[in-house]
Amino acid sequence: MTEQLPERTRAELEAELTTLRERRRSLAAAMQKQESDVGDRGDEANALESGDDLIAVDERIATVTDLLAGGPERSPGRVPDGTRATLRFDDGTEQEVRAVAIPEEIAAGRQDITVTTDSPLGRALAGRRAGDTISYSTPAGEVRAHVVSLDVPGD
């Protein structure tokens, strides 16, 4: 089951897509102009850089379009967007976390309990269930945690 995007997120993605498409048109036009101009190696370097920029914009357009379309139901190696987990760490403390696919969805003041689906913790939770033990890398080193509960949207 594909989860609906929150209205605010959908509006932000649609606005980003419009901006990206305008940027793509502008880059493509600039590249066409560069191709028709005779220049030196500096101009060639600019053309290569513009080509790289165009590829990056095309990739982001594809990503945003996929998100707006609902994206793949489950990405291998990633926990689904909206998943909530309660973890118990080796020192006995428990922490509830929520996974989001889009970093901009992390609310101010909620950074300590929100993870992205492609973060080390988000990837460690993929395919797991309550009762499993996970480990993941942090800047302070490897962390182990027991999955107390795992609420996956659509399950």
Image (cartoon, rainbow, N blue to C red):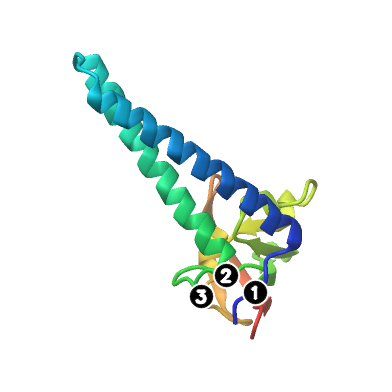
- Name the residue at 41% across, 50% down: 59
Marks 3 and 1, Cα distance to the nearest angstrom? 11 Å
- Determine whether, in the image, residue 117 is placed left or right of residue 91: left
Number of residues whose C-alpha sits closer than 10 Å to that of mark 2, classed few (under 14), some (14–19) or many (20 or more) = some
Q: Is residue 136 visible?
A: no
| Above or below: residue 17 compared with residue 24 | below
Number of residues whose C-alpha sits closer than 10 Å to that of mark 1, classed few (under 14), some (14–19) or many (20 or more) = few
Q: Which label's residue is closer to the chain start, 2 or 1?
A: 1
Number of residues whose C-alpha sits closer than 10 Å to that of mark 3, classed few (under 14), some (14–19) or many (20 or more) = few
- SS state under label 1: loop
Q: Name the amino acid type tagged 1.
A: Glu
Q: Is residue 76 visible?
A: yes
Marks 2 and 1, Cα distance to the nearest angstrom? 7 Å
Q: Return the residue at label 3.
A: 74
| Above or below: residue 81 compared with residue 111 | below
Q: Nearer the viewer, mark 3 or mark 2?
A: 2
Q: Nearer the viewer, residue 35 or 5?
A: 35
Q: Return the residue at label 2.
A: 70
How far across and down, in percent of the image, does residue 98 sit?
70, 64
Q: Nearer the viewer, residue 43 or 103?
A: 43
